[in-house]
Image: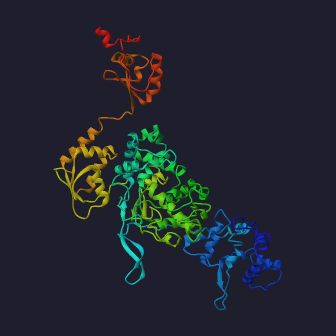
Amino acid sequence: MKRHHLDGSIPTLEVALSECMTAEDLRKLAALTREKLPTRKGDLAAVILRHLEGERLRSVWQALDDLQRAAVAEVVHSGSTRFFADRFDAKYGRAPNWRAPDGRGDRQIASSLGFFFYGNGVMPADLKDRLAAFVPPPAEARIMTLDQLPANYDRPFERWNSKTRTTEKGTEPVTLTLHESERVAQRELLSVLRLVDAGKVAVSAKTRRASSATLDAITAILEGGDYYPHVPPKDRWHDENAGPIRAFAWPMLIQAGGLAQLAGANLQLTRAGRRALSEPAAETIRALWTKWVDTTILDEISRIDCVKGQTGRGKHGPSAVSSRRVAVADTLAGCPVGSWISSDEFFRFMRASGNDLAVTRNAWHLYIGELQYGSLGYDNGERILENRYLLCLLFEYAATLGLIDVALLPPAGARRDYHSLWGTDELLFFSRYDGLMYFRITRLGAYCLGMASDYEPAPVEVKPVLRILPSLEISAIGSALEQGDRLALDACASRVSDLVWRLDSGRLLTAIERGWPVAEIREFLAARCDAPIPDRVVHLLDDVADRSAKVHDRGLGRLIECADSALAASIANDSRTRRHCMRVGERLLVVPASSEVTFRRSLREVGYLLSAGEARPAKNRRTSPLNVTTPEATEA
C-alpha cells in the first residue's frame, strides 16, 4: 500500500482515506459518524466522505472543542498542510485532544480531530481549501513581559545532604546583575577600533579568533571589564569561570563588519573602520548587526565548549547560520521595546511564532563525553542545544552591540535542564551563557532590528543619588548606588573612596577619547545630582569640551627619511611630489596614507625610489638636478 509520509502532502481526502489509513483505522474513525458500519475498506471510506460532505464539514468542525478548532485553524491559515505539534504546544501550552473517552469506563477512542488530519498530522489539500471558507484565523502568538525586574531570581538547586544522606531539592533566591548596554556599546566600539589602530589586536589567521593576550587587552578597555570577572578556581574540577564574552565578540564583529582585516598577525583598520572613528556609533553598530546576521566567520554553536563532534562527523550537520540568526532577529522584532523578557519565555515565543531554530540536521553526531552514550540525539538534547545557541547569540553578540540590556546570574548552577543528559554530572554549566535570565530591547536595538526608522538615545533616568561639591568631589547619597552608575563615575572621575569620586580634566579627556561626549557626561551628572551642578564643575566641563575639539586626527602617515637635508628640501618642493608630502625637521618627510601610492609614483618620476631600511648619508653627493632652490644652495 502506498503511504504518504509526514514530510509530504496529501492532495485529497479520498487519497488520505485510501492510502494513509488501514481498514482498522477507518473503522475506528467511521465509528464516530454513528452510522451502521460496513466491512469493506472502500465502503468505510465512503461513510467518512459522506460525513464530511457539503455543510456537514462545518458541523463537524463546530463540534470540536476550542483547542481542537485552534489546531485546525493553525494549519488552514498556514503555508503548510502539516500540523506542527511542538509549535502548537509552545503557543497554547498543551496538545489538542486526539483521543476521546468512549463513555464506557476508562477506554478512549479517536476524537473528531481525526477527520481533519491523516498520516502523521497532514491535512488533505482539498479539505484545507474547503475549511478556509469558514474557519477564522488563529490568535497571534503572544509573549509575556515584565515592567520591572524581580529583586531576586529563584534558582533551582539539587544537592546531597551528607547528614541526612538524602538529595535536597528546592530553590534559593539569587540577586540578578543588570548590565545596561546601549550607551556602553557605542563607547566600547570606538575603544576597540582604537586598540586595533594601535596594532594591539592579534587574531588567528585560520579561526580569526583573538589571542589570549589580545582578549586580556580588550577586557582591560571594556567598561567594568567583561560580564563575569575571573575568579581563581578552587581546583580544576570546580572552575566556575565563564571566560571572555564581550572581549571575544568585538574582534569577530568588526572583522565580519568589514571594519578591520588581518595584516600579518594583527588586525588593521580598513577604510570603513577608519571612517567609523568619526561617524555616529549607532550607524556603525546597525551595519555590524546586519552583517553579522549573514556572516559565516563563526557559528555560535562552536562556543558551546562541552558539545563535541563539531569538527568531526558533526561538522556537516549544522544548518545555515544566517537562517538561524534571521529567525532570532525576526522574533526580536516582534517583541515590545523596553520591557523585560525571560530568556526561556523568548525561546517559547520563537517556537510558537513558527521561527525555526533548528541548529543541526543530525544531532546524533554531536555529543557530550562519548558519542555512544552522550549523543544529543537522545532525550531532549537537540532542544537544549537550540536553547544554548539562542543564549549565545543574544548574550555574546546582541548585548555586546547594545541591542539588548541583560540581567544575569553566574552561569554555574543557573540552569538544570541539561542534567538529564548522559555525561553532564560534572558540568557546572552547559554553556558560559547559562546565566542570561532576562533581557530587554533597547532603543538602539529597535533601530538595528528595523523596528524604528531612526535612532534617538533613551533619556538618562533622573535619580538624585549623587551630590556634586564645588571642590569637584562627587559623593553617593541615599540608597545604594547601582552598578551602572558606579561604572559611569569610574569612567569620568577618579575614585577617592567607595562612595566618593573626584572630577579632573585628565579623567574627563580619557572618557571623551573612549567615546563619551561631554554633553552626555553633563546629562548624566545632572540626572543623578540632587542639586544644580556647581559653577566650578560647569566651567571644568566647558573647558574640557573646548580642549577636546582643538586637536584633530587626520589619519595615518608614513615617515620617510632622506639621505640629507638638501634632498628632503628638493622632494618637498618639487612640483610632482610636494602635494603628497610634508617636510618634518631636516631630513624627514611625512606622507599621508591616502597619498602613499601617488607619492611613490611621483618619486620615481623625480628619479628616486622609496626603499626599506635606513637612508645612507650621501658622500660628496652632487645636488640633484631638481628644479628647486635649497637653503644650502642659497648659502653657498
> Is residue 619 in sight in this rendering?
yes
Residue reaching furthest top?
636
- Total count of labels: 0
User: Could you say where residue 8 lies in the image, as x and y percent from the top left?
Assistant: 71, 64
Q: Nearer the viewer, residue 56 or 633?
A: 633
Say if 432 sits above or below 543 in the image. below
Q: Nearer the viewer, residue 569 or 243?
A: 243
User: Could you say where residue 72 lies in the image, as x and y percent from the top left?
Assistant: 65, 71
Say if 384 sits above or below 257 in the image. below
Left or right of 581 in this view: 370: right
> Is residue 456 in sight in this rendering?
no
Q: Give me the residue at 41% from left, 52% from top.
A: 247
Q: State how the image is colored.
A: rainbow
The N terminus lies in which quarter of the figure? bottom right
Say if 262 sits above or below 126 in the image. above
Q: Give me the residue at 77% from left, 85% from top.
A: 35
Left or right of 129 in this view: 182: left
Q: Give me the residue at 46% from left, 46% from top.
A: 203
User: Could you say where residue 526 lies in the image, as x and y percent from the top left?
Assistant: 26, 53
Left or right of 17 in this view: 546: left
Residue reaching furthest left?
471
The C terminus lies in which quarter of the figure? top left
User: Could you say where residue 252 lies in the image, as x and y percent from the top left?
Assistant: 47, 49
Q: Nearer the viewer, residue 47 or 111?
A: 111
Q: Nearer the viewer, residue 216 or 537?
A: 216
Say if 403 sits above or below 590 in the image. below
